Amino acid sequence: MTEYHLRIKELPASEQPRERLRDYGAAALSDAELLAILLRVGVTGTNVVQLAQLLLVEQGGWLGLQRADFGVLRERHGMGEAKTATLKAALEIGRRLLLTGQEEQRFQIKSPSDVASLLMLEMSHLDQEHLRTVLLDTKNRVQVITTVYIGSLNASLIRIGEIFKEALKRNSAALIVVHNHPSGDPTPSPEDVLVTREIIAAGKLLDIDVLDHLVIGQGRFVSMRERGLGFVR
C-alpha cells in the first residue's frame, strides 16, 4: 500500500506550526515544528514537519545543524540555498542572543572552557584562521565578541592596536583572545606565543587585562594561560 502523507495545508489549522505558535506561543512547539516554520515547505511525499524531523535526526539536533557545512545542507534534498541560509541565520541569532540581554544576564566567563563553549563549534570548522576577541566587563561578563583578523596569524602583519580598538570603545575591563588552527591541531605555534606576549604587553599599557589566549582545533582547544605560553605563571 502506498504511504499516505498529508501536506501541512491539509492539516487542521490548530495543528499547523505557525498557527500553533500564534495561539500557544513558541515554547509550546516541538523542535521539528519550530524548524518547520523556518523551512516553510516540504517536498513531494514529505511535509515540512516531517522534513524538519528528518533533518534534526540526520544532523544530531540543533548543535549538529549549527555545525553542519552550508554546502552540504544546501545539497540535501528538500533544502536548497534559501532554506539553508534562513536556517543558518536563525541559529546565529540564537547564538548571539546568549550574549545579549540585560547586563545581569550576560554570560559570565569563569574558565577557558566557558570561552570554548561559545566559539568552538563554529571556529573549529573554519577553513581560514580567524582571530577574535571576547570583551568582558569588570565581572567577566561578555560584552561582545569581535572578529579582528581573518588570515594567517603573523606577528609582523598584526597591528596590536586593532585588537584593543573595540575594547577601548566599550570601556572593557578585560579581554580573551581566540583564534583557530584550520589544520585541526590546537597546539600553539612559536608565532602564537610571540603574538600573545605582544598583546599582553599592550594590554598592560592600556589597563585592559588579557586573561587568556585560546587556540581552537578540531573539537579541541588549548588555553595558552594554562600552558604558561606567553603568560607569566
Image (spheres, rainbow, N blue to C red):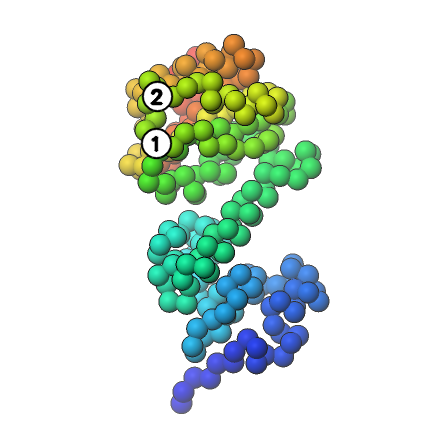
Q: Mark 2 highlights which residue?
A: 157
Q: Farthest bottom residue?
A: 1
* Position of residue 131 in the picture relative to residue 97 (left or right): left
Q: Are marks 1 and 2 in contact (CB under 8 Å)?
A: yes
Helix, strand or loop at label 1? It is loop
At 35% from the left and 61% from the top, the residue drawn is 75
Q: Amino acid at mark 1?
A: Gly
- Residue 19: quarter of image: bottom right
Q: Is residue 159 visible?
A: yes
How many numbered badges does the structure rendering display? Answer: 2
Q: Amino acid at mark 2?
A: Leu
**Looking at the image, residue 23 lies above or below residue 193:** below
Q: Position of residue 233 (x, y in %)?
A: 44, 13
Q: Position of residue 184 (x, y in %)?
A: 31, 37
Which quarter shows the N terminus?
Answer: bottom left
At 50% from the left and 15% from the top, the residue drawn is 203
Q: Farthest right residue?
A: 23
At 45% from the left and 59% from the top, the residue drawn is 82
Helix, strand or loop at label 2? It is loop
At 30% from the left and 19% from the top, the residue drawn is 190
Q: Considering depth in this image, is 233 or 193 the residue closer to the camera?
A: 193
Q: For the residues marked 1 and 2, what is the alpha-carbon distance in whole angstroms? A: 10 Å
Marking on residue 103: none
Q: Mark 1 highlights which residue?
A: 151
Residue density around tag 2, few if under 14, some if 14–19, many if 20 or more, within 10 Å = few
Q: Position of residue 23 (x, y in %)?
A: 71, 67
* Position of residue 92 in the picture relative to residue 1 (left or right): right
Q: Is residue 233 visible?
A: no
The tag earlier along the polypeptide, 1 or 2, is 1
Residue density around tag 1, few if under 14, some if 14–19, many if 20 or more, within 10 Å = few
Q: Position of residue 214 (x, y in %)?
A: 42, 28
Q: Considering depth in this image, is 206 or 194 the residue closer to the camera?
A: 206
